[in-house]
Image (spheres, rainbow, N blue to C red):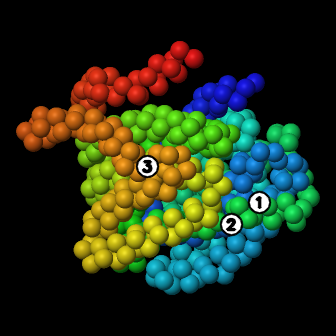
Amino acid sequence: MGFVSQAKKGVVWTFLQQFSIQLINFVVQIVLARILVPSDFGLIAMITIFIAIGQSLSDSGMTSSLIRNNENTEGDYGTVFITNLGVSIIVYCIVYLIAPLVALFYKQEILTQLLRVFGLVFIFSSFYVVQLAKFTKELNFKSQFTYQVPSVVIGAITGIVMAKQGYGVWSLVGLNLAQASSFGLILWIFYKWKPKWNFDKKVFRNHFDYGYKLTLSGLLNTIYLNLYRILIGKKFSPASVGFFTQADSLRLFPVNQLSAVLNKVTFPLFASIQNDDVKLREAYKSALRLVLSLTSAMMLILVLIAEPLFRMVYGDKWLPSVPYFQILCIASIFLPIGTYNLNILKVKGRSDLFLKVEIIKKIIGVVSLIICIPFGITAIVWSLCLTNIFFAYLNGYFSGKFIDYSVIEQLKNSLSIILISTIPYIIIQLIIHYNYIALQDSISIILQGGMYVLIYLPLVFLFNKPLMRDIKLVLKR
């Protein structure tokens, strides 16, 4: 089977996998949000940074190196597996020891045990990350779909049952641990291929040299993104962290599903044409046109229906999340631009430049955050939004040099797509919101979403000719 055919099948199976898994998780989060209180989600958000850092350190960027590598041997897979397992055990021990300090920092005693138990996910996940890299490298998303869905269902059932039994915040921990442990167990029982227990120092150095720079970049990004939760948790109540976290999770749900589907396929696809700058540029443009057209429309629809959506899905107790959600939706429009630009640096093997760009961005972001702290949570969220938009094009400035696609050209092309998406939003605001038309929540969601689509599609057909050519080409093939 040719690589293009594999990529097409990969898109289908990645979509099925991503959509089904995230849909299950999304429904479970809704159920849990109705049973639990915002402070339960806030407590988990307070330790999220330590879980995310631990997982980044455990992987050390070496699975990305496996995906990028042209040819992998059993020695490559075995070396990365042993390294991930060993590092994850060390990381868990460190997290176990610092847990009381984390609880003292937030003045929340329960965080000690929460972090110590939740941290076990490092060790569980180290048993399947190499298999996931192998699936991605081979574009074998069908197998990943087959093995992962049962584990997500097991985790979902565990979390809901624990919540209904009155375990509170521990039901969120149980959900994640059950999902990670069952996925690893299913793979080791039913998947024929398993990594060998062999370690090669030369292979380790090769993957580590590429991966550690990505790890440092990932750590900077993880710390930076979670810095908002840390400061909100320190300065405000756990419930405030819960409101922010729920808004952030909901706004990322649709854009992450779309981006994850295409990222899993486009990263190895970009890597396969990394030496042909013309093809790489055209592939980049096509992917970005499609994703940006969809995400900009989805995010603006969500801004329109935010209040009735939160009230209907989560209940009135979560309405303080709405303003944060609307601001963050604006930031999500620009998320694919930054992601694809960073992928160009990765496939070009410039993990050193990747790291430098991340350092520059995080310095700017932290300064902006510090300036906004005295003005409250809303100002902090606006800081996150505006800096993310700036970072998307900063990534483009560096990556554009490798594919002869300047940041000015990227800016013109992307803003023209976003402008088309904004027109239906303005029309609906003028018709409904500024005229204070009162509607039931369900009717409001359906009416505004339907109006947006009916206005948006003709505009795309008339004014986004490159996208229409891409769609026609795909349909013909």
Q: Who comes first in sequence, dot 3 or dot 2?
A: 2
- Please name the amino acid that badge 3 sits on: Ser
Q: Is residue 129 left or right of residue 417?
A: right
Query: To which quarter of the image does residue 176 belong?
Result: bottom right
Q: Which residue is mark 1?
A: 207
Q: Which residue is mark 3?
A: 406
Q: Are marks 2 and 1 in contact (CB under 8 Å)?
A: no
Q: Is residue 434 left or right of residue 310?
A: left
Where 390 falls versus 117 (above or below)?
above
Q: Who comes first in sequence, dot 2 or dot 1?
A: 1
Residue 336 percent coordinates (x, y): 46, 46
In terms of depth relative to the viewer, which is nearer, 195 or 393? 393
In terms of depth relative to the viewer, which is nearer, 393 or 23? 393
Residue 428 percent coordinates (x, y): 18, 35
User: Cα distance, mark 3 to mark 2?
Assistant: 28 Å
- Please name the amino acid that badge 1 sits on: His
Q: Is residue 146 left or right of residue 431?
A: right
Q: Is residue 433 visible?
A: yes
- For mark 1, does the 10 Å Cα neighbourhood hold few (<14), some (14 to 19), or many (20 or more) residues? many
Where 153 falls versus 207 (above or below)?
above
Res 52 label: none
Q: Is residue 144 visible?
A: no
- Please name the amino acid that badge 2 sits on: Tyr
Front position among marks 3 and 2: 3
User: Cα distance, mark 2 to mark 1?
Assistant: 8 Å
SS of the residue at dot 2? helix
Residue at 50% across / 20% down in the picture?
A: 473
In terms of depth relative to the viewer, which is nearer, 139 or 24? 139
Res 212 label: 2
SS of the residue at dot 1? helix
Front position among marks 1 and 3: 3
Of the 4 image quadrants, the one containing the N terminus is top right
